[in-house]
Amino acid sequence: MPQKVFRDAVHNMISLELGDSPLPWEYGDPLLLQLIDTPEMQRLRHISQLGLASRIYPSAEHSRFSHALGVMHLARRILEILMTRQPGLIGRELAVQIKVAALLHDVGHGPFSHVFQEIYPNAPHHEYWSQQIVLRGNGPAGLIRAFAASQGYDGEVWIREIIAFLGEAPLQGVRGVGKQIIASQLDADRMDYLLRDAHFTGVDYGRYDLEWLLHSLRVGMVAGNPRLCVDISKGPSALESYLTARNHMYRQVYDHKTVRAFESLLTLLFRTLTTYWHQQGRVPQATPQPLADFLAAAMTGGVPSVEHYLALDDTVILYALRSWANLPDSGDPLLRDLAWKSRLLQHRHPVYRRLKWHAFAGGEEVDDSIEDVNFFQDILAFFQQEQDTLLVIEDNVSLPVKLLVLVDCLDRTPYAHLHYRVTQGGEPVYVIQRGEKVTAAEEASSTIDFLGHARQRLARVFVDPRAMTAVQGLIREKFTSHYGQMG
């Protein structure tokens, strides 16, 4: 049977059937091909997978589009394994819905991925936009309805069920297994992005034994509900390597302090842009029209339309940065600040500096990370209280603290151990041991149990270098015991 083949740097060949296939996990492939060719999916070619990380890892230029194909491919492989090993458990109608959800799971990402969610206070996250984009009548929803109707199914029901896979609410029964394939601690999303991001950043931290992990997947029963499990009767090494890879990638790539510095710079640039809007009631004249239209809706208290959102991608923001970097000096401090920050991002000039603190109150050791939870809560509260305080950054030019300082807080664990799931409401990775016993992974592996306790909770304070002296003076008296030298 003829196939469409995508060559992929991570999975080699991603194949989809062009016509009807008797194999249930290949059912619906023509619909996937139609969805791939929609403008909504093609837009992801212009959304970087790792945002500003390419400033530090030059080859990390891969897109959300290639990641979406990889997640769809892995979801299809997982379905093949489960439907072959446990026939009758997952029907072909459910299988195609899972594949569609896997393909579309990131369709709502904005420019530079997660950073764009900070463009204005309380901006909707990409999960919201993904659902709204799928629901568009002239977009993916129309193709899904048409395919479902051609197969004798109710298209509206299909759309609701696909949207449920993209939402946060847990699903029960065998649909809960589908939800795990899309979004869980053992999902196709993480399986792909760890390998893909490791490949394109050029690091080995994210590599793990994908083939054996897939080979070990099964469905087991937990409290009467089917759940995706890993068979570790021959050892937990593949699962351990997967979770360890995630730990290393967050610590060494995603949370790299210079990556976070560039993200902080872009976040503060967005704050300058929205502050200018609130003062002037408009965007700077050099702002590209798609971004101006989006902000016009957002800044007046509404939620921008899906059409306005879809008009944005990395190229729009990059064009805006080039335009703002060349703004003539009008004497307006906000426009000057916007131009200065744009030049930093455009030319990769030295980025924001980090405040350094005594690791222990009164101690000699100095670090840029605050791990004392009470202390970083005090720091957050302090800068929130001082956000409108004006600081002099150059002769006769002052800006408020909120445009010059960002407290970057991290709270991550490579594996959501039972201790943390109590408050986060998640599920463990389930494993099947000898004798068909199903347990949480941390109960079967000391390595995974350790990873569950390896919680990284810290804060860094990024400061505009023009304001470093002023910020030093602002905080020195209040935080004398913790305050160290600047770095």
Image (cartoon, rainbow, N blue to C red):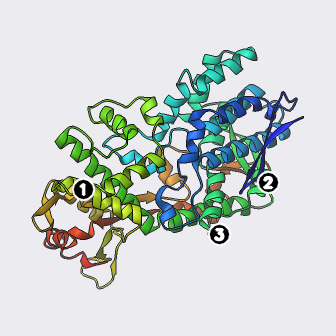
Apparent side of residue 89 relative to residue 408 in the rendered image (left or right): right
Quadrant, the N terminus: top right
Mark 1 closeness class: few <14, some 14–19, many ≥20 residues within 10 Å = few
Nearer to us in this view, 340 or 65 = 340
Task: Establish if 285 lies above or below 302.
Answer: below
Nearer to us in this view, 68 or 295 = 295
Nearer to us in this view, 33 or 480 = 33
**Which mark identifies residue 204?**
3
Nearer to us in this view, 165 or 442 = 165
- Label 1 to label 3: alpha-carbon separation: 45 Å
Task: Establish if 76 lies above or below 114.
Answer: above
Where residue 286 appears, as percent x and y from the top left, is 31, 46
Farthest residue in the right direction? Answer: 1
- Label 2 to label 1: alpha-carbon separation: 71 Å
Q: Is residue 232 visible?
A: no
Which of the two discs, 2 and 1, labels the residue nearer the N terminus?
A: 1
Report which quarter residue 467 is drawn in. Answer: bottom left
Q: Amino acid at mark 2?
A: Arg
Identify the residue shown where x is 24% and y is 62%.
Answer: 379
Q: Which residue has dot 1 on it?
A: 328
- Label 2 to label 3: alpha-carbon separation: 32 Å
Report which quarter residue 147 is drawn in. Answer: top right
Q: Which residue has dot 2 on it?
A: 434
Mark 2 closeness class: few <14, some 14–19, many ≥20 residues within 10 Å = few
Farthest residue in the left direction? Answer: 396
Where residue 94 appears, as percent x and y from the top left, is 71, 28
Where residue 15 appears, as percent x and y from the top left, is 79, 43
Quadrant, the C terminus: bottom left
